Amino acid sequence: MQWIDVRSDTVTQPTPAMRAAMADAVVGDDVYGDDPTVAALETAAAAALGKDAALFVPSGTFGNQLALFTHCERGDEVIVAEDSHIVWHEVGGAAIIAGVNLRPVLQLNGDAVRTRIRPGGDIHLPRTGLVCIENARGNGSVMPLETMRELWDVAQAAGIPVHLDGARLFNAAAALGVEARELTQYADSVMFCLSKGLAAPVGSILAGPADFIERARKKRKLMGGGLRQVGVLAAPGLIALDEMSLRLHDDHANARLLAELLEQLPGVVVHRDQLDINMVFFELLDIHLDADAVIAKMLAQGIKANLPEAGVWRFVTHWQVGRSEVEQVAAAFGAALRR
Ligand SMILES: Cc1ncc(COP(=O)(O)O)c(C=O)c1O
């Protein structure tokens, strides 16, 4: 069965070109620095982000945790948005791997960071080691460049590095209509995922200054992320970076179309303020329904969707959910609500 899968963009299959590139990839032992395809990907990624150097890592979580581990000393405090992936979905890894405390803030802006930076000279206080930004945000919205610059200016003035969790960096760039490096100029280090909307099967990139990446390379080995003939994964990564990053505006347009179609159904209220990328968040007002039954009915129509969380549904578009699939999803959801 040809499924339509709107659970996430993490479900994307590699494109036919990616599968061919994997088969043909020239590889070597990357722990020896011998894999030319990994080297090509790291060079291309660093250039795209305007950074000195880049490192292939197994996942986005790995890249974020490696960034904390490389920037910080044990016991440091990391200022980060309360609803961020690092706080919610990385299994508390910050305490285990880097040994840092997270200092979550509700609204990440210049004032919030300024007032939370620990003054030096008091033996009672931890050191503020890092500010983490997420863009695009996990709730589907994109942080404006002005806010990124404000955060950067505050951190710079205090001599504190900034890490950007850019799991969906290229979605954010497409939504803002700018090059990725216009966002990454406001961060010392950045992680982005080659998987998700960019459709590579595995992998993320951590980029930053040369000395930071050199230290991260050693810590990546410590974390078990020194991979051998990994050019088979870097090859689709190059296609993700060079080609798939250029088509994300299609996914965004399809998400907006899906939002419009869903809004035509009775009771559906789309969270328009979060509709910046490929994610449609919505609620059903005044409708009391059995969400499990809705999911089952959609499944019977060949559509995979997630259950709502705290009453909020999320449908995600990607290269395998085009205009026609969007129309089928909206129609199947409408039918499931009616029956
Ligand atoms: C904002 C954000 N950061 C980091 C990650 C982690 O990526 P991975 O699933 O590759 O570990 C995700 C995954 O969905 C994410 O949404």
Image (tube, rainbow, N blue to C red):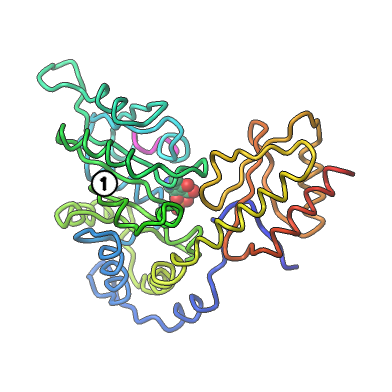
Q: Which residue is mark 1?
A: 186
Q: Which residues are magenta?
A: 91-95
Q: Is residue 190 left or right of residue 335?
A: left
Q: Residues within 10 Å of mark 1 (few under 14, many from 20)?
A: many
Residue at point 34%, 37% (across, down): 94
Residue 79, how many percent across, how many down? 31, 31
Q: For mark 1, give the secondary structure.
A: loop
Residue at point 38%, 58% (across, down): 204
Q: Is residue 313 in the magenta section? A: no
Residue 306, how many percent across, how many down? 67, 46
Q: Which residue is the extreme one toward the bottom?
A: 24
Image quadrant occupied by the N terminus = bottom right
Q: Amino acid at mark 1?
A: Tyr
Q: Main secondary structure of the magenta part?
A: helix
Relative vertical location of residue 62 with respect to residue 151 in this rendering, above or below: below
Q: Is residue 315 left or right of residue 286?
A: left
